[in-house]
Structures are given as structure tokens and as C-alpha cells.
Amino acid sequence: MPISTLRYYERRCILKPKHSPEGYRDYGDGDVAWISFMHRIPQVVMPLAQVDEYSRLREEGDGTMRQRLEMLEEQRGLLEGRQHMLAEQQAFLDTKIAIYRKSMRAAAEH
């Protein structure tokens, strides 16, 4: 993850690493796991406002686990819908490609 992205998450208070006495950021194991999770978030297309809310709930602790689970399940449902839509679009393109190939084969035979 680019440093600029880490700093951006820090400015939004999504990422809060500890600092050494010299002022250097000290990323612990929990921070690394959270960064890994955050790296995947854009791939599941979770809106930044939801990332902020998820981060806030995460910081509140295990008492918010159900809310975080619901957020992730909702996001998964949205991805399933997108996946279905993409499969339909792919099938449409496959049909169109097959038509062109068939037409080209027929033209080549004549």
C-alpha cells in the first residue's frame, strides 16, 4: 500500500498507528492486519463513508461485532448482485461473439 494511502487513512482516523519516542510510526501486528483488510476494501467497492463507520465500530471493540458483521454481509450481497449482472453481460457478449464467428465462418466457406 502506498505511503500516501496510509497517510490518507491516518488523516481520516481509519488507521491510528502508535508512534515511537522519536515520532516514527510504529505499526504493530494489529495495524498490519487492519492495513491488509483496508487494502482489500476498494476491491469489494465499499463506499468510504461505510469504511469510516466500520473503522469507528472496530475501534469501539467486540461489542460492535454484530454491526460490523451486518455491514460485511450487506456488502457481500451487493457484490453478489454485481456478479450476477456481470455474468449476464458476459453471456450477452458471448452470444454476440458467437454470431460474428458463425457469420465469418459462413462467409469464408463461400
Image (cartoon, rainbow, N blue to C red):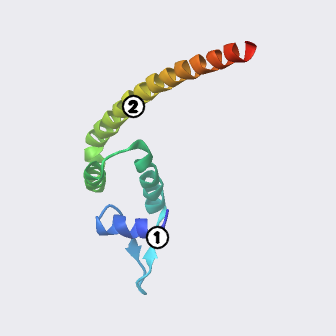
- On screen, residue 20 versus residue 65, left or right, reads right
Q: Residue at x 66, y 20 (%)?
A: 104
Q: Quadrant of residue 101?
A: top right
Residue 82 location, x and y as percent? 39, 31
**Cα distance between the residues tagged 2 and 1:** 31 Å
- On screen, residue 102 versus residue 88, left or right, reads right
Q: Quadrant of residue 103?
A: top right
Residue 53 location, x and y as percent? 25, 51
Q: Element type at marker 2?
A: helix
Q: Residue at x 30, y 69 (%)?
A: 11
User: Residue extending furthest front?
Assistant: 110
Q: Does residue 54 lie above or below 81 as drawn? A: below
Q: Residue at x 41, y 49 (%)?
A: 42
Residue 37 location, x and y as percent? 44, 51
Q: Element type at marker 1?
A: helix
Q: Does residue 67 lie above or below 5 as drawn? A: above
Q: Is residue 16 visible?
A: no
In the rendered structure, are the residues bearing label 2 and label 1 in contact, judged by CB atoms less than 8 Å apart?
Answer: no
Marker disc for residue 82: 2
The local crowd at label 2, few if under 14, some if 14 to 19, many if 20 or more residues have their Cα within 10 Å, is few
Amino acid carrying mark 2 in the image: Arg
Q: Quadrant of residue 108?
A: top right
Amino acid carrying mark 1 in the image: Ile
Closer to the camera, 32 or 86?
A: 86
* Mark toward the start of the polypeptide (2 vs 1): 1
Please give the residue where the numbered disc 1 appears in the rendered image.
Answer: 3
Marks 2, 1: nearer the viewer = 2
The local crowd at label 1, few if under 14, some if 14 to 19, many if 20 or more residues have their Cα within 10 Å, is few
How many badges with numbers are in the image?
A: 2
Q: Residue at x 46, y 54 (%)?
A: 39
